[in-house]
Image: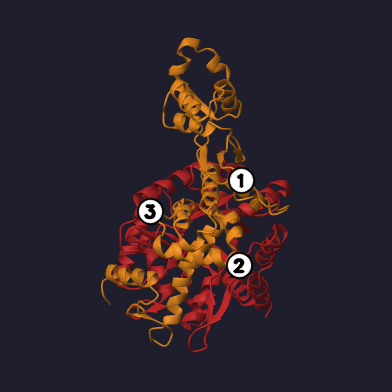
Amino acid sequence: MPPWADLQSTFAAALRDPQHPVPSGCIGPDGAPDAKRFAIYRNNVASSLIDCLAESYPATRRLLGEECFRETARWYTTQELPCSPILLEYGASFPDFIGELEPLAELPYLADVARIERAWLEAYHAAEATPIAPAVLARVPAHRAGELCLTLHPTVRIVRSRFAALSIWQLNVAAANLRPIPLEARGEDALLCRPAAEVYARAMPEGGAEFICALAAGEPLGLAAERAGGACINFDLTEHLTALLEGGLIIDARL
Amino acid sequence: MSAPFSHRDIPARAGVGLKAHHYRAILESRPDIGFFEVHAENYMGAGGPPHRYLTEIRSHYPLCLHGVGLSIGADAPLDPQHLRRLAELLCRYEPALFSEHLAWSSHGGHFFNDLLPVPYTKATLYRVCEHIDQVQQRLGRQMLLENPSTYLTFAANSYEEGEFLGEIARRSGCALLLDVNNVLVACTNQQWDPLRYLDRFPMAHVRQIHLAGHARDVDARGRTVLIDSHDRPIDVAVWELYSRAIAVLGPTPTLIEWDQNLPEWPALHAEAARAEAHLLAPPHRKACRHAALG
């Protein structure tokens, strides 16, 4: 037998390539190489990863239909194997992969729906954290409020879409009462977060995504509000900040 | 957390693989069941409902931790990050048992998400034992190693499977997990005799049993091939082998694994009850009594 390391390399290469011959020395009960038996391993690898994606992307799967979703996912698994045994990390690049697939161009919102599903999954598994009490901010002198750096809850995710991706996602996970959403419907910014046990998803008012993204990038409150004001002339800092505080989405505030 | 069950408290009863789909039903009905078992890798996220539910369930039941990603059978060194994550989980949930597979799943920076076969040679024996030594030292406890379900074998094998596992247990000091469904799957696929397999299995090292359902296929020559699918009730032939195994082992903690096409909780609980009936009234007791009377 070749050294185990070499045989394993051949085995791994054959798992990834259906044209690859059965690794020498891998035999069926009659002592002969058996391509169909080897294909069981190849199929186990692919189908378990496809199942993992199907579980992580239920709305994408519903929008594509079972057969088309599995074919798309199968293709993805041939390009992208997990790099860790923690499968809940697998499939992060699946939305981008979908977005670049020519045959799916007629569903231009699909990649954004998948991004929302990914954000949901990340919010679901992200670390727990304790929010600060709203009163903490009240103790900051008014003239220094703009210098405050706020730390957002680790489950906060923003998905920006030029389509009504959040509404489309909500309709397709609710599984009932489908109503048409016109393609020309305005874009939506979605906030996903899990301040306690459940993941919430809601549409952000104008300027909200700029505000949260600036805070997430570590910018102080004053600068974040300016960026939001640049995106929405009527941006109301107090209203947005109160929503974040009352939603339990700020876990630290420092001058 | 302070767990009410130490590692000594794993009962010789039936347990069930814990699935997210059943969290609520379990907490609402608090079924009378021996223990739960989880796949370690499903609880390696930083936070979230999986940890919240497992913490709650763990406060009521004994737990076993079953790894599916350590790749003990690989030639390459074990991933120290993964060992660290396992150590953290063991510390957090204090499971009664920790088990892994005689298989490999990672190679060249990729994880294949399947339990791939290992040749049974002197060289792989040494490598597997080195890896198990490392695991047991790092985790500070004995681990259990599970017999694999296989679809192929290696021309280079110089040990029978049971002999190989026994040698590993003897050299490394690990215990064994006897997966009875894997016995039937491997024996059917390799055309080994499952009764002979059980007769020659190093039973003295077995601390836990797994039972699961399998699918049926055929190979290119029309010979039956069993697939370790964990997606249906346990086959009657597996129940028979299980009876034989516990006739030798005596009552042993037994897990029902059901990972795909999940049934509702009552159906799964019923499978566990069926295993428990075997444990409580094992045929070997009757056999012994008859022998004594005879």
The quarter of the picture where the C terminus of chain A appears is: top left
Number of numbered discs visible in the structure rendering: 3
Instruction: Say if labels 2 and 1 share a chain.
Output: no
Foreground of the two, A223 or A130: A223
Residue B163 picture location, percent across and down: 41, 73
Q: Quadrant of the N terminus of chain A?
A: bottom left
From the rendered image, report the letter of the chain displayed in orange: A
Circle 1 chain: A
Reading the image, the residue beneath label 2 is B231
Q: The numbered mark 3 sits on a residue in which chain?
A: B
**Proximity of marks 3 and 1: CB atoms separated by less than 8 Å:** no
Image height of B157 relative to A220, above or below: below
How far apart are the alpha carbons under marks 2 and 1? 43 Å
Compute the Cα span from label 3 to label 2: 30 Å
Q: Quadrant of residue B255?
A: bottom right
What residue does disc 3 label?
B135
Query: On the rendered structure, is A48 left or right of B292?
Result: left
Q: Residues within 10 Å of mark 3 (few under 14, many from 20)?
A: many
Image location (x, y in percent) of residue A130: 54, 29
Q: Residues within 10 Å of mark 1 (few under 14, many from 20)?
A: few
In the displayed structure, does residue B33 sit left or right of residue B224? right
Q: Image height check: is A156 above or below B138?
A: above
Chain bearing mark 2? B
Point out which mark residue A185 bears.
Answer: 1
Q: Quadrant of residue A133?
A: top right
Q: Disc 3 marks which amino acid? A: Val
Q: What type is the residue that disc 2 sits on? A: Asp
* Chain letter for the part of the structure drawn in red: B
Q: Secondary structure at mark 2?
A: loop
Mark 1 secondary-structure assignment: loop
- Please tell me which of labels 3 and 2 falls first in the chain: 3
